[in-house]
Amino acid sequence: MFGREGYQGASMKAVAKAAGVSKGLLHYHFQSKEHLLVEAQRLAFQRIHSQFEGRFKQGEYGIGTALEALDSLWESVRSLRSWAPFMVETMSLTNREQPVRRLLDNFYDESMELLTQGIEKVFQAETHPLVMPAARVAWMVRTTLHGLVVELAYARTPSDFENVEQVYQDLREVFSMFILNPQTPITIAEGV
């Protein structure tokens, strides 16, 4: 959408032009670029959650479905690869700009609730319990995605992007081996 320079430094006018809408229309719906970015991610997460809710209703549970959901989350982040520097910048603004902090807090609250619900549902039919509570797994997923966004923002070459993709694949493999393994000794600290 914005090419190699990505979303960083793009004005609302440039965003409107790239989206094929008027700047006024964007400002009517979004107070800032940060608001637009957070809403785009919110919609992506809601869409993924709805998609998998439908699959749960059809009886699709277990690690395979969980990995497909994780892949969908990663794809939603990866599809905004050119925006990764702006995502990192937006996250860094939360300590200085209260409106951005409220936007991200609301997004995180909603996305963490959706992730936790999804994790509980996808593993509800398993004979072995999760190695940690669903809310802790949701935090791991969120933290992993944040780290991958930072790596995407830092990546410059095709090799860099391949390395980020490999890290995701490695994390996915560790997740699949670890999440339901009754032999995995984990000490759960109090709290989330």
Image (tube, rainbow, N blue to C red):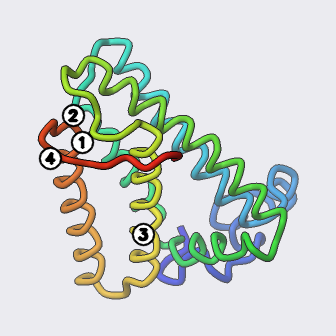
Distance of mark 4 from mark 1, alpha carbons?
6 Å
Return the x and y of residue 54 as percentages of the image width and height: 41, 19
**Amino acid at dot 3:** Gly
**Amino acid at dot 2:** Ile
Distance of mark 3 from mark 1, alpha carbons?
20 Å
Q: Residue at x 20, y 68 (%)?
A: 166
Above or below residue 146? Residue 4 is below
Return the x and y of residue 3 as percentages of the image width and height: 49, 77
Above or below residue 78? Residue 131 is above
Q: In this rendering, which labeled residue sits more in front, label 4 or label 3?
A: 4
Q: Residue 12 is drawn in which quadrant?
A: bottom right
**Amino acid at dot 1:** Ile
Secondary structure of the residue carrying tag 1 is loop
Q: Nearer the viewer, residue 11 or 70?
A: 70
Return the x and y of residue 133 as percentages of the image width and height: 40, 37
Q: Are marks 4 and 1 in contact (CB under 8 Å)?
A: yes
Secondary structure of the residue carrying tag 3 is helix
Distance of mark 2 from mark 1, alpha carbons?
9 Å
The first of marks 2 and 1 along the sequence is 2
